[in-house]
Structure formats: structure tokens, C-alpha cells
Amino acid sequence: MELNERAELDTSQANDLGRGSGGSGGGMGIPIPGGGGRGGIIGIVVAVLVALLGGGFGLNAMTNGDEGGQAGGGDLEQVCSTANADRLDDARCRNLLFVNSIQDYWKKAYPELGRSDYEPTTTNFFQAAVNTGCGQADSGVGPFYCPADRKVYIDLSFYDELASRFGAKGEFAQPYVLAHEYGHHVQNLLGTNAKAGQGDQSGPRSASVRLELQADCYAGAWAKHATESKDKTGQEPLFTSITEADINEAVDAAEAIGDDSIQERSGGRVNPDQFTHGTSEQRKRWFNRGYDGGDPKTCDTFGTDQL
Ligand SMILES: [Zn+2]
């Protein structure tokens, strides 16, 4: 993968919340839902949508994000502007570029799903913990999309974890992860996740697994068109090249975080009743389906018996 040094990034699509925004003294002012008997509903939404890797498996070896000279809480507008010659060495700017590409893709693809305009949303980079419209979360849950505030959240040190613990070392795992989370945003706009919230939340044919495999398929559809995506000016491509090896890195990442692989890795037996995201084979296959066709309409995981 090569990123275009000349690309102008749309910094309105990401924020760097830095560290400490999840603490009691954070003062973020985001209301945390809950109480009044809504906990069950929130619990389900969180279980379905919060974590790329499924809630509740602790990534307790998180590094604390001070690698790569990232101060945290920085002003992305400055850091990621073309005036900063080194910006693409900064993980935040690289991930912002990925987000720009994913959303530029959906701007075109979303209307093809028979809907009106795609509504872009923001990715919040955080460290350690964060307050969200879905409640407080720490890095242990992995990257997630919160349907209540319609934002993507990621502690960028997650990628180190993905490489070291799950063996998904390739950098193209990063845009795959983000494209999966934006897949959940698309599902939120379409109302797919609201419907899925009424179905089973675990098990090999559950609504949760269907939702997650569809997000993988959407990520594949983006990957197919990623080199066509343009920067803020609409003139410059964001990627100058994406190779077959890059795509394989995304596939490897999808495979590494299948429910069965995670269960095996954590030393347990494979228990399909507890599947929430799909097996390694399924995640890889649905990503590839999206990639091969390049068409999100082929991602109908709800209308098939062949998951
Ligand atoms: Zn997911």
C-alpha cells in the first residue's frame, strides 16, 4: 500500500481525544445512557455492535499509546495538514486517510443501496478509556461503533495487539478494521442493526453473526474500490497503490479474529453457541465476497441460509 503524499485530508472526519477522556474528571459531558430499565436494551446494542472482536475478551496487554511520538489530544487539522511533511508517519493521519477513503466510497455506494445520501461520521481516537453515547468503554473492548452517537472509537494501540497477539501484522489490517466499523455505521443508517437487535445475539446463525459478517463484506466492497477514492479536493487519489499482498493482509486479519480462533486461542473449546462474529472461515469468505464483487448488494447475510 502506498499513500498519496499530496492528498489533502478531511480532518473533520476524526478527532483525537487523547488520554483521560474516559475518566470521572474527563468532563466530556456525554450523557451515559442507562438506568430506568434501559440497561437491557443498551446491553444488547453494546453486545451486538460495540466490539470488532466481540465484547468481553480483555486485551489486557494494551500498550499505552506513547509509541511513535504521539502526544495524544493533538490538533489533527495541524498535524495532518500538507504543511507537515511527516504527517503520513503519524498513525493518526494514516488512519484519518483510511477513514476519508472509506467514507468517500460510501458517498457513492450508499445511494446504490436505494437510499438517499450517506451521512458521514467521525472516528474518535482515544487512549485507554473513553466516554461515549453508549457508555464508558476502555481499550480492552477493541475498536467499536456506537449506534447511539453514531461514532467510531479506536485506541490505535489496538493494532499492536492485533499484530502481536493475533498475528495480523500487515498494515492493511488497519483500514480493514475501520471499514468494518464503518460497515456498522452503514447498517445503522439503513436500520439493519435495529432489526438485528431483535434477533438472537449469539449462536452460529444469530442476527449478531449476520451483522458482523455483513460488516466484513462491506469492508471488502470498500477495499475493491479503495484506489478510486479521492481526497478532500476531489482531485487527488488517497491511495497510490494497493496490492494483492495488502488485500491478503486484510483477509488474514479477518481470519485471525474469527470466533472459533479466538476461543481456541484463549484455551477453551470451540463453542458455536457463543459465536457473535462468525468463524475465521466465514469472516474471510464474506470479506472476499465483498471484495470480489465490489458491490455491497451482494452482502445480504440476512437473506441466506449459507452463512
Ligand atoms: Zn463488528
Image (tube, rainbow, N blue to C red):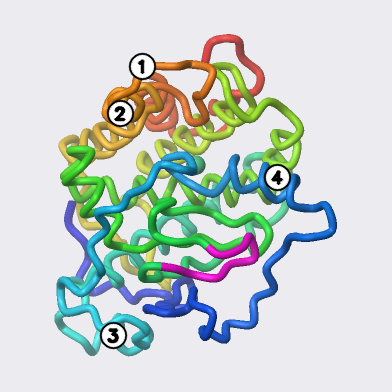
Q: CA distance from mark 3 to mark 4?
A: 34 Å
Q: CA distance from mark 1 to mark 2?
A: 18 Å
Task: Write the residue at 55% across / 51% down.
Answer: 108
Distance CA(mark 1)–CA(mark 4) = 36 Å
Q: Earlier in the sequence, mark 3 or mark 2?
A: 3
**Amino acid type assigned to the residue bearing label 1 in the image:** Arg
Q: Could you say which disc has been placed on residue 269 in the image?
A: 1
Q: Which residue is mark 3?
A: 79
Bin the neighbour count of mark 2 within 10 Å (Cα to Cα): few under 14, some 14-19, many 20 and up. many
Percent position of residue 62, x then y: 27, 58
- Judging from the image, what secondary structure is the residue with disc 3 in? helix
Q: Residues within 10 Å of mark 3 (few under 14, many from 20)?
A: some
Q: Amino acid at mark 3?
A: Val
- Relative height, residue 167 to residue 199 (above, below): below
User: Element at badge 4?
Assistant: helix
| Magenta stretch in the rendered image | 129-136
Q: Nearer the viewer, residue 29 or 86?
A: 29
Name the residue tied to disc 4.
190
- Spatial separation of the CA atoms under disc 4 and disc 2: 27 Å
Identify the mark nearer the N-term, 3 or 1: 3
Q: Amino acid at mark 4?
A: Leu
Secondary structure mostly seen in the magenta stretch: strand
| Foreground pick, 17 / 296 | 17
Distance CA(mark 3)–CA(mark 2): 34 Å
Residue sitting at x 30%, y 28%:
255
Residue tagged 2: 255
Q: Residue at x 25, y 83 (%)?
A: 71
Looking at marks 3 and 4 on the same chain, the residue that comes earlier in the sequence is marked by 3
Front of the two marks 3 and 1: 1
Q: Badge 1 local density, few (<14 within 10 Å), some, or many (20+)?
A: few
